[in-house]
Image (cartoon, rainbow, N blue to C red):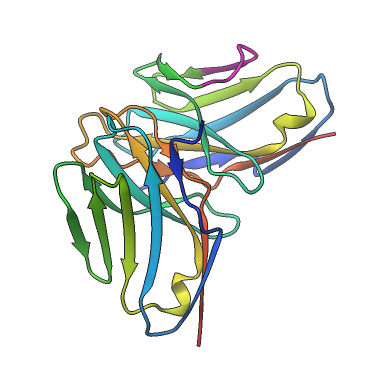
Amino acid sequence: DQQVKQNSPSLSVQEGRISILNCDYTNSMFDYFLWYKKYPAEGPTFLISISSIKDKNEDGRFTVFLNKSAKHLSLHIVPSQPGDSAVYFCAAMINTDKLIFGTGTRLQVFP
Amino acid sequence: ETGVTQSPTHLIKTRGQQVTLRCSSQSGHNTVSWYQQALGQGPQFIFQYYREEENGRGNFPPRFSGLQFPNYSSELNVNALELDDSALYLCASSREQASSYEQYFGPGTRLTVT
């Protein structure tokens, strides 16, 4: 039972354009959502998070949007840079409990 | 500030053997979680340790066990290794009462079971 789903295994975007990574979830009890970025041979790195009581959180080039009614969140990266090329994981949690991860989306930003 | 470190980096074991993986948490963090990441999948929660006690467990059999020490470092032990245990094992630490619930990951240990 996959509670957090990332249906796009890969995404290719031109440098300078917007990257939009999507994530769907099934458990309405999730109260916190996070995005992690992972480079090869490294552990996931925390990128940005959002509480379930909010619908948007912004940090520099990164913005996360949460649509609770649709059980959907998205990560926007503007403008995309080649260094953003990595695997992005969406994760959710309930009350600081375990992180439940999606399967990841590989983002490639090309010149 | 020292980040999360894990050892060893890579490990090859034979089916049926036992393995111990180690993790040092980030300075100031007292909670350690372990995750298994199989190829092409997202990390899956194994268990969490808080102040030397197991504080939550995922859907993993009892042959996966752990310890947390007074300095908050941690070990993951896996007995009777199976081929499907081949994966990247990630350790993550976090602060108690962290307002943003962020967990900081180490680079992982790549375990191959043959």
Residue B41 falls in image quadrant: top right
**Front residue (pair A54, A83):** A54
Is residue B64 magenta-colored?
yes
Number of residue marks: 0
Q: Which residues are magenta?
A: B59-66
Could you tell me which residue is drawn at 39 percent across and 47 percent down? A24
Residue farthest bottom in this picture? A111
x then y, percent, for residue A62: 28, 66
Residue at (24% x, 50% y) in the render:
A67
Rendered view: B100 above or below A111: above
Rendered view: B16 above or below B43: above
Q: Would residue A90 appear left or right of B61 to someone viewing this image?
A: left
Q: Is residue B9 left or right of residue B4?
A: right
Residue at the outermost front position: A70
Q: Position of residue A48 (x, y in %)?
A: 29, 55
Q: Is residue B78 magenta?
A: no
Q: Say which residue appears at 18% left-offset and 38% top-offset.
A: B99
Q: Position of residue B114 (x, y in %)?
A: 85, 34
Within the image, what quadrant is residue A57 found in?
bottom left
Which secondary structure type mostly characterizes the magenta part of the structure? loop
| In the displayed structure image, the side of residue B71 where residue B97 appears, left or right | left
Q: Residue B95, located in which quarter of the rendered image? A: top left
Which residue is found at the position 24% from the left and 52% from the top?
A66
- Eyeballing the image, is A13 above or below A59? below
Using the image as rendered, state which of residue B54 and residue B20 is in the foreground.
Answer: B54
Residue B90 picture location, percent across and down: 54, 39
User: In this view of the protein, which residue sits in the foreground, B20 or B84?
Assistant: B84
